[in-house]
Image (spheres, grey):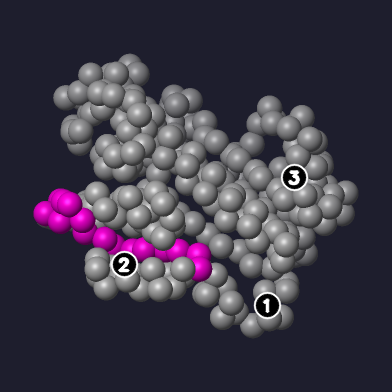
Amino acid sequence: MNAQTSKRTRVTVLGSTGSIGKNTLDVIARHPERFEIHALTASRQVDLLLEQCLRFSPRFAVLLDAELAKLPAERRARGTVVVLHQMGSHGPAYHKRTPKAFKVFQPECTQTSLAACSLEEVRNAYDNTIVYTDHFLARTIDWLRARADRTTPALLYVSDHGESLGENNLYLHGLPYAVAPQTQTRVPWITWLSSDFEGWRGSRIACLQRERERALSHDHLFHSVLGLMGVGTEVYQRELDAYAACASR
């Protein structure tokens, strides 16, 4: 993830102690005039993360396993929610959302004025952000799988909006919902459940796959999270729970 500062691009590296994270930092180290490290995250390798902190001086460094371990045991036993927010595919600077290794679609637009680029360049830059998001989700699921022997993990991913990429001379997002094209209003909703989580909630992936064409909106998100985690509250509305039809408990 990254964000533009007045002089350099701020970069957050998720999994900085892994092979891709280390390669990313090596590239950044060769271009100190263009990039600065804003935050680093890792799972367990404390010594390597410390070494990276000394080298790059990030504003934030998070060792996720260590942070989770600080929670009282009784809280961890009840379950833990980790919220990750990406820059993802936010425009117009799509080209700044992806490390070089994930720029598989070329040529890509490197302008913030998207109309100055060809439609192919704009779409390539955007598609590269999807490639990187796929990687981000895969790494997150790998992290959850690695802890399935001591937790009951699940993942829910949803985007807040889509993007127009020059169709009918429209770019980005933000049109009133009533007139916005589907490219701005249709977004992915992805669910991954560990086998133990399926058993705990009775929510089977096979059942959810049969429901994948069901029309959902962000109105369903709050109630779906409550239902997925088994939270009992009077504000819960079962009809807005995307998982309710496939849950046996």
In the structure shown, which secondary structural element does the residue marked by tag 3 occupy?
loop
Q: SS for tag 2?
A: helix
Distance Cα–Cα, label 2 vs label 3: 41 Å
Above or below, 119 relative to 151:
above
Sequence-first tag of 1 and 2: 2
The answer to whether residue 225 of the structure is visible from this angle is no
Mark closer to the chain start, 2 or 3:
2
Q: Residues within 10 Å of mark 2 (few under 14, many from 20)?
A: some
Q: Which residue is mark 2?
A: 52
Residue under the point 28% across and 19% down: 119
Can the viewer see residue 159 in this picture?
A: yes
Identified by mark 1, the residue type is Arg
Q: Is residue 106 above or below residue 194?
A: above
Q: Which range is magenta?
A: 29-44
Q: Residue at x 38, y 68 (%)?
A: 48
The residue singled out by tag 1 in the image is 75
Q: Work out whether mark 3 precedes mark 1 in sequence or the reverse, and give the earlier one.
A: 1
Q: Is residue 161 above or below residue 164?
A: below
Q: Residue furthest right?
A: 248
Q: Which residue is mark 3?
A: 243
For residue 8, which numbered disc appears in the image? Answer: none
Residue 126 highlighted magenta (yes or no):
no
- Residue situated in front as seen by the camera: 236 or 139: 139
Q: Is residue 33 magenta?
A: yes
Instruction: Look at label 3 and name its amino acid.
Output: Tyr
Residue 33, quarter of the rendered image: bottom left
Q: Secondary structure at mark 1?
A: helix
The x, y position of residue 89, in whole percent, is 38, 39
Q: Are marks 1 and 2 in contact (CB under 8 Å)?
A: no
Q: Nearer the viewer, mark 1 or mark 2?
A: 2
Position of residue 164 measured from the top left corner of the image (x, y, whole percent): 37, 27
Amino acid at circle 2: Gln
